[in-house]
């Protein structure tokens, strides 16, 4: 499978492969202070019976919003494949673009909330609003659904500045209400 490394990380969160994908970074780089995003994080389960996901974020160039993310064990030690992560801005809205392969697509996460010890992300597009926006011409993208009628992926051949601005302004209408909540945790020495 093409995105196997990325999916191993996201499967811990119960995300499957329902992402907005695009070939270039969205918006502009968002500067972050060193250490603001780095460290060990735990993703709270979204459903009863699910296990939490553990992640480790490393500063690469926080002044340019560039980080590395990988799966971690319950002690916060990195154990998975490294992926690029970029903090981006379009207008007043922050996004995270993540990809597992240098030549692969970016997977879009919307930053709903960002605090020093908690990050809340939207990631899963809603089928009906995205279909309507694509049909209306707001987006030039291909939407694929699974057997349940949920979005399996939305692929932008190119994400224009106008489309990015529309996403930034209307994302709450375009993504499902379910969120990923990441909480920073201190790794014991």
Image: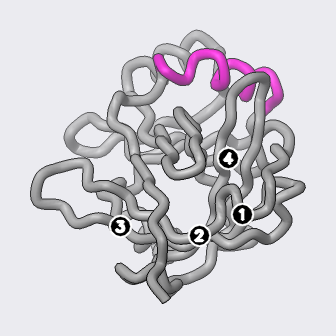
Vertical placement of residue 164 versus 12, above or below: above
Q: Upstream in the sequence, badge 2 or badge 4?
A: 4
Q: Earlier in the sequence, mark 1 or mark 4?
A: 4
Mark linked to residue 39: 2
Residues at marks 1 and 2 touching, judged by CB atoms closer than 8 Å: yes
Percent coordinates x, y for residue 79 in the rendering = 48, 87
Which residue position is annotated with label 3?
53
Residue range corresponding to the magenta coloring? 160-173
Q: Quadrant of residue 16?
A: bottom left
SS at circle 3 = strand
What secondary structure is found at the residue carrying circle 4? strand
Rendered position, 81 above or below 83: below
Q: Residue 22 bears which disc, if any?
A: 4
- Sequence-wise, which precedes: disc 2 or disc 3? 2
* Quadrant placement of the N terminus: bottom left
The first of marks 1 and 3 along the sequence is 1
Distance from disc 2 to disc 4, alpha carbons, whole Å, reads 27 Å
């Amino acid at each position: 499978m093409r995105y196997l490394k990325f999916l191993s990380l996201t499967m811990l969160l119960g995300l499957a492969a329902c992402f907005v994908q695009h070939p270039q970074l969205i918006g502009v780089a968002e500067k972050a202070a060193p250490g603001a995003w780095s460290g060990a994080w735990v993703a709270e389960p979204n459903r009863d019976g699910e296990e939490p996901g553990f992640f480790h974020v490393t500063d690469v160039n926080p002044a340019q919003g560039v980080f590395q993310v990988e799966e971690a064990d319950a002690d916060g030690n990195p154990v998975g494949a490294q992926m690029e992560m970029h903090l981006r801005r379009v207008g007043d809205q922050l996004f995270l673009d993540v990809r597992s392969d240098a030549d692969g697509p970016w997977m879009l996460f919307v930053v709903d909330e960002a605090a020093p010890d908690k990050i809340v992300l939207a990631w899963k597009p809603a089928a009906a609003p995205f279909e309507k926006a694509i049909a209306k011409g707001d987006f030039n993208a291909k939407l694929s659904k699974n057997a349940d009628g949920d979005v399996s992926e939305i692929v932008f051949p190119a994400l224009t500045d106008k489309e990015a601005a529309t996403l930034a302004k209307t994302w709450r209408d375009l993504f499902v209400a379910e969120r990923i909540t990441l909480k920073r945790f201190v790794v014991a020495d």
